[in-house]
Amino acid sequence: MNSCSVLVALVFLSIAVPASAQIDFSGEWAPRFWEDQPERVPGPELGDFLGIPVNDAARMRAETWDASIQTLPEWQCRPHSADYIWRGPSNLRISKEVDPVTREITAFHAEWLRSVDRAIYLDGRPHPPPDALHTWAGFSTAKWDGDMLTVTVSHLKEGYVRRNGLPRSDKATLTEHWIRNGDLLTVMTIVNDPVYLTEPFVRTTDYELDLRQQVPPYPCGVVQEVDRAKGEIPHFLPGANPYMKEFAIRHGLPYEATRGGAETMYPDFMQKMKTMQPAKEEKPATPTARRGGSLDPAAPPTPTGR
Amino acid sequence: MRALIAVVVALAAAVGLYAQGAASSIQILPVRGNIYMLLGAGGNITVSIGRDGVLLVDSGLAQSADRVLTAIRTLQDQLDLRDQPIASGAETRSTIASRNSEPPAKPIRYIINTHVHADHVGGNEKLRAAGRTFTGGNVAGNIADAGEGAAILAHENVQMRMTTPSGGESAVPADAQPTDTYYTDSMKLSHFFNGEGIELIHQPSAHTDGDSLVWFRGSDVIAAGDIFLTTTYPVIDRARGGTINGVVDGLNRILDLAIAEFRTEGGTLVVPGHGRLSDSADVAYYRDMVTIIRDRVKAAIEKGMTLEQVKAAKLTADYDPRYGATSGPWTTDMFLEAVYTTLGGGKKPAPANAPTRRPSGRK
């Protein structure tokens, strides 16, 4: 091929490629549990706050959290929020909207097994005013950063950063980076929560294209799961949750390490852990202790009742 | 009225909107159909606007009334543009122009007060005067001023508080008081307004003793007043009959009325007294928080803890970054004190030799 032919070919190629890159993320994606598998399919253990930059308020929320709250009618059909659902064990379908005139992608829609439709707008529309309705999916806009799609999410309802009671507030915002490499999709999520996190919480999650996949329907109906008095909300009094040390004891970890915090995200913490004592089994609770709670948020958890 | 405003402006400031209401413009937020939310006037104002006229839930601060009227006029102009089919040519332009330069055909006809505080009733007098009550027959003939001003609806305890204020306050002017009150569990507008039924539901002893939830039954929107806030812990006005258990009951009442559209979101929409537009999930989160704190304080009382011990125990530490305050007119300590006292905390136990009532019904 002479130089003239190469030049002509380059000109045609430059015409064929859009001015702004538009990688197609649409398709059926199957999750690959290459990160934090125990948290994702079996579910996280109670008291495992490791590797999350939570503050004391978040710890107290989790320590007083009772999983039975999920049986309340208001929470039985709650889906994972936009920031957490990537880590759910569900398959993912991404579809696209295309402008009929310009043929540009104007929006992606992501849906998982138990999710609501999540729209990601690329058409330049603004975010709603701050006092507009917040949703599980939030409100997402995106822009191309080369081949990477950077998504900004606002208007999130309260959610959780881990399914063991660690909260994420409705003041949080989410930034995502969608990266496609052939049949692999990597999504980086960065959660900023001024209420419950001391640093941004960053995770990556991987999916693989699956041409035979179908996201099945998942209807949800509210039923009376537990016979309880009207208005009763399951929770533990501060300092009264007997399960907080189970995770540390089972895995031979220092209890202080399992309390999480920004420090526990970084490799240096591995060295510090070597200087800490693993948690040990404690004596079973006495009947007296079971009848009361400490009401002291700073108290170490004791095997007492609610 | 001035004294009442002075007292209650503190509560308005507690939810962080007083300054905004006094200085900035009114934000109009569409809720659903012909229901809108006005923010920045003090307490949130819910507006129903349509061919029957305008109905307001609450009237904001007195000093915001002119800006509220401007916002309402904006909605009325949009209504004209939205509902009138556009013809063509010069006739269309002249029709729209004439419509925009004349007063709207149907004015403010109803103002509903969710409770007595000045950030929710302060605009009553001016907004009422800008409106009109449609009447006729014997009423129109025998009562000359029957049609003057909009009707103001509220629970009768709102009027009681206005006419017999406590603590040296002066009574609210007659033109700012409710024209129609109810003392039963609920009150319905006697006919559809802008295409739907509207119901006032009394919630006893919650934020105050005169709280009403206002339910737009067709649009499925609930104006919650200050029973539900997204900005702070519940403001409990003990001097006017508010209690923590009433607030919890009120939040559960909202959840009883509400139906989510799908996966616990959407469906029934809830306009809080202050803060952002919400749905049943938002109310449920708030209900959970208030109930959990109530239970903690109750357990502390049962353990014999004093109010100071309860405050020192930091029983709200997990929710404080979201709802708490260490300064200003409604601090976390004030909230805890209201919870503690309305749960009966701090009452001296009866002396050991005090006479006790004999159980009745058994001999």
Image (tube, coloured by chain):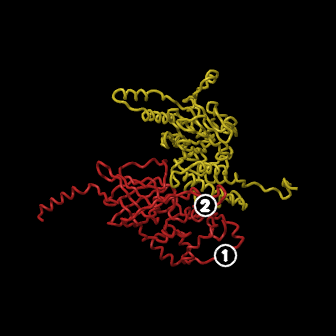
Chain colours: A red, B yellow
Q: Which residue in the structure is indicated by mark 2?
A: A225
Give residue A251's position: percent from left, percent from top.
54, 77
The amino acid beneath tag 1 is Pro
Number of numbered tags placed on the structure image: 2
Question: In this view of the protein, can residue B66 be seen by the observer?
Answer: yes
- Check disc 1: other Cα within 10 Å, few if <14, some if 14-19, many if 20+: few
> According to the image, label 1 marks what residue?
A284
Q: Earlier in the sequence, mark 1 or mark 2?
A: 2
Residue with the most extreme right position: B363
Both marks 1 and 2 on one chain: yes
Where's the N terminus of chain B, which quadrant?
Answer: top right
Of B73 and B13, nearer the camera is B73
Horizontal side of residue B275 vs A25, given as left or right = right
Dot in front, 1 or 2: 2
Residue located farthest toward the top when viewing the structure as drawn? B141
Judge the density around disc 2: few (<14), some (14-19), many (≥20) Cα neighbours within 10 Å: few
Residue under the point 46% across and 70% down: A36
